[in-house]
Image (cartoon, helix red, strand yellow):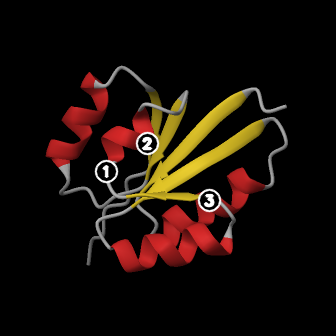
Amino acid sequence: MAECKIGVVGVGKMGEYHVGVLSDIHEAELVGVVDSDQKRAKIISERYKTSNYKDYKELFKKVDAVVVSVPTFHALFDCQRIHSSRNSHSIRKAMYK
């Protein structure tokens, strides 16, 4: 039985990486994924045999923690995530030329 229920918000390249890693951790249950690109979220959820959520708030109700893997310009989302009082780990990658 999983000790920690985890969701992933954002399933781009880094988000998919986290989904893959989490799906291999026996102590974790990958509850589901959510992304603004519903087509991509559906593909990833089917690939890793997890649920696809259309609204991150619904995902948050079912998890103990979330991995947030979204571009840095999504500050509003980060503020809402913090207010949801969930444990989370935000992956941020700034691109500089």
Q: Is residue 22 left or right of residue 10?
A: right
Q: Quadrant of residue 80?
A: top left
Q: Quadrant of residue 85?
A: top left
Q: Which mark, residue 19?
A: 3
Q: Which mark, residue 55?
A: 1
Does label 3 or label 1 sit earlier along the sequence?
3
Check disc 3 and report its element: helix, strand or loop. helix
How far is mark 3 from mark 1, CA to CA? Answer: 18 Å
Check disc 1 and report its element: helix, strand or loop. loop
| Residue at the spot 29% in from the left edge and 27% down from the top edge | 82
Check disc 2 and report its element: helix, strand or loop. helix
Which residue is disc 2 drawn over? Answer: 59
How far is mark 2 from mark 1, CA to CA? Answer: 7 Å
Q: Quadrant of residue 17?
A: bottom right
Kind of residue at badge 2: Leu
| Residue at the spot 69% in from the left edge and 64% down from the top edge | 49
Q: Are marks 2 and 1 in contact (CB under 8 Å)?
A: yes
